[in-house]
């Protein structure tokens, strides 16, 4: 059984659409999480779950990405919800051989960024 533990201090968390500057290129959505270096330096993240409106794109490199700060995880919207206050992310991690989780709510959905 996992226990809730507030271990990570989030500096910034948001989802943003990146629109390539190349005609007919597909836009991508990313979940970006910047964690304070103090709370991230001695702890790795095992898994991320996005709740409400987005799902993580299955990718071979997601397990590698969970080792880096900031995290940049490719996500895909499956419905658009105007109530941004319900968007949350759940991080799971292991500490001293016990499983824990931490919930981050009110994740921002930023305006799209248009790449050159």
Image (cartoon, rainbow, N blue to C red):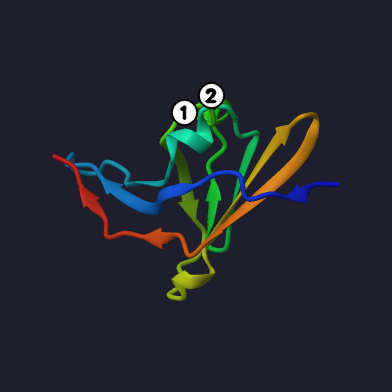
In front here: 35 or 51?
35
Helix, strand or loop status at disc 1: loop
Distance of mark 2 from mark 1, alpha carbons?
Answer: 8 Å
The answer to whether 14 is drawn above or below residue 70 in the figure is below
Residue 55 located left or right of residue 94: left
Circle on res. 68: 1
How many residues crowd mark 1 within 10 Å: few (<14), some (14–19), many (20+)? some
| Residue occupied by mark 2 | 64
Circle on res. 58: none
> Does the residue at mark 2 contact the one at mark 1 (Cβ under 8 Å)?
yes
How many residues crowd mark 2 within 10 Å: few (<14), some (14–19), many (20+)? few
Quadrant of the rendering where the C terminus is positioned:
top left
Point 51% across, 28% down: residue = 41
Residue 42 location (% of width, % of height): 57, 27
Helix, strand or loop status at disc 2: helix
Residue 69 location (% of width, % of height): 43, 32
Point 33% across, 51% down: residue = 17
Residue 92 location (% of width, % of height): 67, 42
Residue 99 located left or right of residue 63: right
């Amino acid at each position: 059984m996992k226990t809730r533990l507030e271990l990570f201090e989030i500096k910034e968390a948001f989802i943003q659409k990146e629109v390539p500057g190349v005609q007919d290129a597909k836009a991508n959505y990313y979940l970006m999480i910047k964690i304070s270096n103090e709370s991230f330096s001695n702890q790795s993240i095992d898994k991320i779950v996005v709740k409400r409106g987005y799902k993580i794109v299955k990718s071979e490199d997601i397990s590698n990405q969970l080792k880096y700060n900031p995290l940049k995880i490719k996500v895909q919207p499956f419905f658009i919800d105007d109530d941004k206050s319900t968007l949350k992310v759940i991080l799971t991690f292991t500490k001293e051989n016990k499983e824990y989780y931490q919930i981050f709510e009110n994740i921002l959905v930023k305006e799209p960024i248009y790449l050159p």
